[in-house]
Each structure stands twice: as structure tokens, then as C-alpha cells.
Amino acid sequence: MSRTLTVGVVGKGGAGKTTVSARLAETYAARGMRVVAVDTDSNPNLGLSLGLDLATVDALPALPTTAVTGTRTGPGSADALLSEYGTATPSGVTLLTALRVAEAASGCQCGGHRTVRSLLGDALARSTDVTVVDMEAGLEHLSRSGGTLAHADTLVTVVEPTRTSVVTAGRTQALAAELGLDVVLALGNKVRSDDDRTYLEQACADQGVRLVAVVPFDEAVAAADRGGGVGTPAPGVQAAVDALVTALDATVPARRGADRS
Ligand SMILES: Nc1ncnc2c1ncn2[C@@H]1O[C@H](COP(=O)(O)OP(=O)(O)O)[C@@H](O)[C@H]1O
Ligand SMILES: [Mg+2]
């Protein structure tokens, strides 16, 4: 791939954003790309899905909200931030934790969102081939003063076969378009039957949402989650993620920032 790719993974709470972010990041890493996975959830779990143990995840350094990148080199550059705050995970993906609520009711995370926006908008794009951003549930990150994801190339909306999930995907797409982010792909998740698949295909078509692949409900994913490990996902899970990667690759000409190299 000649250009960097920044993918924001969005969707309703529990839809599978973290699971999909981890599998997507690992799939790119397995193809030899330099991949950074950014956890922007204030309750960060992406590290667990990337194979780190709980003690490591709880001790992960969070990016300071003052870490605003504006230069290519030196303190504050994405390279410096990556080496100071990035954590290597077993698959080779580098994990960055952007937000962490250490104490209950610690208030607004705007500083953290600003950091993510700044990182995405600047040098992180030059230090990596692919950046996958696991977003907190909700649509706030698409609206907060320009949107945390204003610099993402592409959004992946994770949708379960439920009406609320698909409606959320439709709203997300509309908000993203307002930000000038036109490339929004939907990935179905936790599909248990042909009926689920048919429903998702129809409901996404009704909402104008582009469904590119469907991840089956996989007991191994659920069990791994309960057991605190990663486990071996069913072949259907990887096949869907591979199809997503193919769809993402096909969006290259349509991506904003086509002048970046
Ligand atoms: N394809 C799947 N099959 C089975 N369980 C899944 C699947 N995708 C996600 N899950 C489970 O659903 C729960 C929510 O997933 P998660 O990725 O944490 O969602 P989110 O980040 O959107 O809140 C987790 O327990 C996870 O293990
Ligand atoms: Mg999550």
C-alpha cells in the first residue's frame, strides 16, 4: 500500500468495535504493515483483545492530553509519542491508549479527544502504514469541535442485526458526511443465522448503509472474552475481516488526503 490508512471503528456499545479493531489491526500486521491501534475508550479494553494480560493493560501508559503533535521530529512528534507511550502486542501491533478514566466522575475527556485528533491529523500518519482507532460508543466523537475522527480516512461501522444498530449506522454515516468523511463501510457482526444476514442486508440497504461483510456470531470469541484470552476465532470471522480489508483497499482512490504519501 502506498498510502497510509486511518480507520475509525464506530458503532453502538457492545456491537463489537473492540473485537473488530483488534482483528483488523492484526490482519494488517500479518500482511507486514506497520500498524498502530489506538484505544480511545475511557474504559480501555483493546489491549486485552490484542492479547495483553489484564495487569499489563491496567498499567498501560495513557497519552497525556498535552501531547499535541505539531512537528515531525523531536518531543511531541508522533514517533516520540509512539516510542514513549506505544506498547508492543504479540501480533506486532503497537497499542496506544488515548483516554483513561482513572477515577470515577473525573469529568470531560475533551483533552484526550483533542490529542487523538491531533495525532491522527499529523505525524502518526507518517510513522505507520495503518492506524486503527477503536472508538468509544456514541456519536460525540464525530461532532465534538470538528470531531475526533475528522482526520480519519475511513469509518467502519460495526452493526449487529438489530434495528437500533442499523439506525445508528445510518446516523453515523450522515454525521461523517457532514465532516467530509464520505467513506463509511459497515461490517455486520454477531450474525447467527441466514435470517440475521438477510435482515442486515435489507436494513442496511434501506438506510443507505454499505454492508461489506458479515462476521458470524462465534462462540470462541465470546468464550475467549470470558476467559480473558484471545482464542482462535472461527474461519468465518477471519474471512469477514479479510473481506473488510479488501473493501478498505478498494477505497484508496476515494479517500480524503490523497495527497499524503
Ligand atoms: N462475532 C462475535 N461473536 C461472539 N461474540 C462477540 C463477537 N463480537 C463481539 N463479541 C462479544 O461481544 C461483546 C462486546 O464486544 P466488544 O468488541 O467489546 O464491543 P464494543 O467494543 O463495541 O463495545 C464482547 O463480550 C465480545 O467478546
Ligand atoms: Mg469497546
Image (cartoon, rainbow, N blue to C red):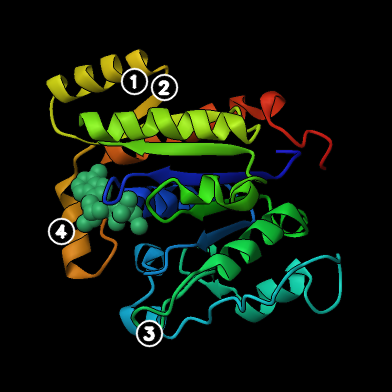
- Looking at numbered disc 4 in the image, what kind of residue is underneath it? Ala
From the viewer's side, name the closer residue of 123 and 23.
Answer: 123
Quarter placement of the C terminus: top right
Q: Which residue lies at the image location 76% right of the left edge and 38% below the top edge?
A: 2
> Are the residues at dot 3 and dot 2 in contact (C-beta closer than 8 Å)?
no
Give the mark nearer the N terminus: 4 vs 2.
2
Label 2: state its secondary structure: loop
Give the mark nearer the N terminus: 1 vs 3.
3
Q: x, y (%) of residue 245?
A: 51, 35
Q: CA distance from mark 3 to mark 2?
A: 38 Å
Give the mark nearer the N terminus: 4 vs 1.
1
- Residue 223, which numbered label? 4
Tell me if I can see residue 180 in this picture. Answer: yes
From the viewer's side, name the closer residue of 100 and 111.
Answer: 111
State the residue position of label 3. Answer: 103
Label 3: state its secondary structure: loop
